[in-house]
Amino acid sequence: MTRAEGPGAAGVDPRELWLTPDSDRPRRGRRPAFSREAITVAAVALADAEGIDAVTMRRVAAEVGAGVMSLYSYAPDKETLLDLMIDHVNGELSAPRPLTGDWRADLKAIGHLQREHMLRHPWLAGAVPARRTLGPRTLAFLEHALAALRPSGLDGGARLEVFAQLTAFVAGHVAHEVTQAEAAQSPGRAAAEALYLTAVAADGHHPELAEALASAGRPVTPDATFARFLNRLVDGLDAG
């Protein structure tokens, strides 16, 4: 693969990465008993089970029964492998529900679909915002989202920005959800934080916080919280 100066997937020619099939890739020696797809599937399984830090070229090579050096003809570095992984799992988004023509409702449906997807693959929430993965499965979902936004009257560039804004919001929210779920496994910590906030709210120096904490409760299930935040984001978008 052609690489420019500097490490990582930024230097990989996307035409070579996404448009060149395995059978056309130059290689030396015997034909390997694995494929780029097998490598990617193994890496995704590792990330799902153990987190993205567990994904190393050595671990993936061991999973597919290959020598580590042989992987580099398919993914020259971990950054490229991560792009392959993201596009692979984005295939799960390839059959979203049909569009209704109500762009706000359709955009909310896309947001919920993205959240479910990122919760199935928690490593995605941290990986997606920092990357521009241009693989075919990712572009297929982008095409769907842009079509959903067409009735808004926004031009193509603005629709791209809205989708990027939505994806960043969902990724940030899911990252927070995952962190909160981990914290919930330590009920003592959560109880201590609640007592602390109660004390701070009562000290007279934080009236806004005291009012917020005393306000009527809202549903706090993860699904309800996400829906509430997503509604505020999408309903507040300016389509003018």
Image (cartoon, helix red, strand yellow):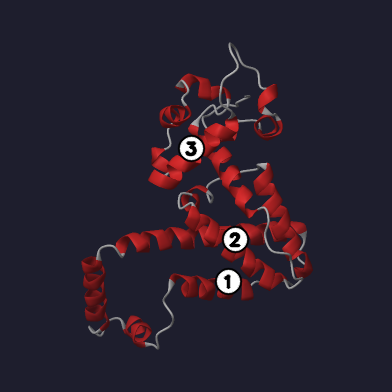
Q: Nearer the viewer, residue 4 or 219?
A: 219
Q: Amino acid at mark 2?
A: Gln
Name the residue rendered at 63%, 67% in the picture: 109
Residue beneath label 2, please? 165
Residue 137, given in percent of the width and then of the height, sits at: 66, 46
| C-alpha separation, residue under disc 2 versus residue under disc 3 | 28 Å
For label 1, the residue is: 233
Question: Mark number for residue 43?
Answer: 3
Q: Eyeballing the image, is 113 above or below 10?
A: below
Indicate the quadrant containing the N terminus: top left, top right, bottom left or bottom right: top right
Q: Is residue 122 above or below residue 44?
A: below
Which residue occupies 49% across, 51% down?
A: 121
Depth check, front residue: 172 or 19: 19
- Above or below — where is 1 with respect to 151? above
- Residue 127 is left or right of residue 137, and the answer is left
Relative side of 234 to 179, left or right: right
Residue 1 sits above or below residue 204 on the image: above
* Circle 1: residue type: Leu
Element type where label 3 sits in the image: helix
Amino acid on which disc 3 is placed = Ala
